[in-house]
Amino acid sequence: MKENHKKIRRMAAKALAWFFAAMVGLTIVSRAAASFTVPRVITKIPEYQSVSHTVYCDGTLLAKREMAIVAEADLLIDTVFVSVGQRIEEGQTVASLNLEDLSEKTELLREEIRAAEQEREAQQTNSSVALKRAKEDLETASSCAQRAVDRAKEEAESAAAAYQSYQNMLGSRDVTEEEYRQSVALLEEKKAKQEAYEQAQRDKETALRDANRAMEDATQSAKQSDVKQPGAGQRQKQLERFEALLAAKGNITAPTAGMITEVIGRAGQKTTDTAFCMIADPGSGLLFSAQVSREDADLIEIGDTMTLTHNNQKVEDVTVGALKTESDGSVTILADVVGTDWTPGSSAKMELSGKPSERGFTVPLSALRSQDGSYYLLVLQETQTVLGTQKMAVRVDVTVQEKNDNLALVEGGGLSGESEVIIDSDRAVSNGSQVRLWEK
């Protein structure tokens, strides 16, 4: 009986040992399973600070004062001696023109001017002859018309006198039929001669009017022939410029010292009526110009300072001088740049810190989540369960007040300086998910 009792005890001890061994094994298996199924998270405590904004963009360095070097149009370019960024002195040759082409164009222009002058002289001669003839015609018309009027007047007066004399002879006595017919004939003669006299006067007025108009036309034509044709003065000035180029052997020179910022003319091409090249005065300083979006422009004010970088050189405290809104809604920033040897026409990078937001709780942008247009965070909380204390991800709705490329300033959700906000995880996490800290 005793031996059976001992045997039972040994068996119970073995069973208890196996039970504890099984429990340890299950715990190990459970923890191993948890390492594969429970997400690991990284958390961060919200910081109480403001959100700053930095605007980056590329821009162009412009010369404040530029002038154009202009060549005569439609001339063949032989050689261009300058390039962008090159400093030149006053009188230095920037390009040379083809002398053969220049000579041909000059001679052609001379011929045009000579032909125009000959035509004007011919017009003057013709106008002078026409004016002389018009004067003669006016004098002739006036003389002839006056003689006709004088004759008509004499005849009218004679007919009137004859009629009156015949009436005086008849007196108041009764007249015969023959006397009556004679009286009527003399009256008709008087009327006809008076009408002829009046017509002669009208004919004189018409002749004088026509002759005067012809005289006026001839006088106006003579005046116009004395005036040079439109463009004659411009052609003469152009000829003088061509001749000056020929004297300079076709060389185009710089009117002042400076730096070449743009070259438009090319060897083998014809010159145009626009600038051949642009030259900047290095002493006038530089102007930085850049375009930013409307959103970035809202962060910038006149008087803000920026840092410019050009060829690994930096200039700090460059002040925004102007903001210009363009038709497409973008905004152009203009700022003076002084104290550099940078080249006009080259590019530079801008870095500008905009005005910061109000202070508040900030979280990394990676912590911010959205759903249906609303923002929320997942905050780590400890919860008591049947298995003990466990860490859970709990959704907290927030309002985003400000954000930049790294941080978001949020409010709401009862956030404090002790909240553990989930900013990263090794797998998807949602509201109510069991999580564990990522121990590195």
Image (spheres, rainbow, N blue to C red):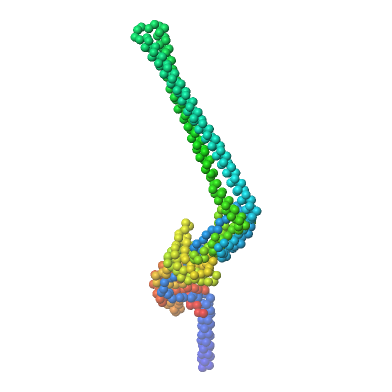
Residue extending farthest left: 172
Question: 370 or 199: nearer the eye?
Answer: 199
Q: Residue 229's quadrant in the figure?
A: top right
The reply to whether residue 234 is visible in this rendering is yes
Residue extending farthest right: 100
Q: Position of residue 260 (x, y in %)?
A: 56, 63
* Residue at 48% in and 67% down: 337
Q: Position of residue 103 (x, y in %)?
A: 63, 52
Question: 380 or 343: nearer the eye?
Answer: 343
Answer with left or right where residue 5 lies relative to residue 77.
Answer: left
- In the image, residue 134 sits, relative to residue 79, either above or below, namely above
Q: Position of residue 359 (x, y in %)?
A: 40, 72
Question: 325 or 262: nearer the eye?
Answer: 262
* Residue at 48% in and 68% down: 338
Q: Position of residue 381 (x, y in %)?
A: 43, 75
Give the number of callouts.
0
Question: 89 or 292: nearer the eye?
Answer: 89
Answer with left or right where residue 92 lies relative to residue 182.
Answer: right
* Residue at 53% in and 68% down: 342
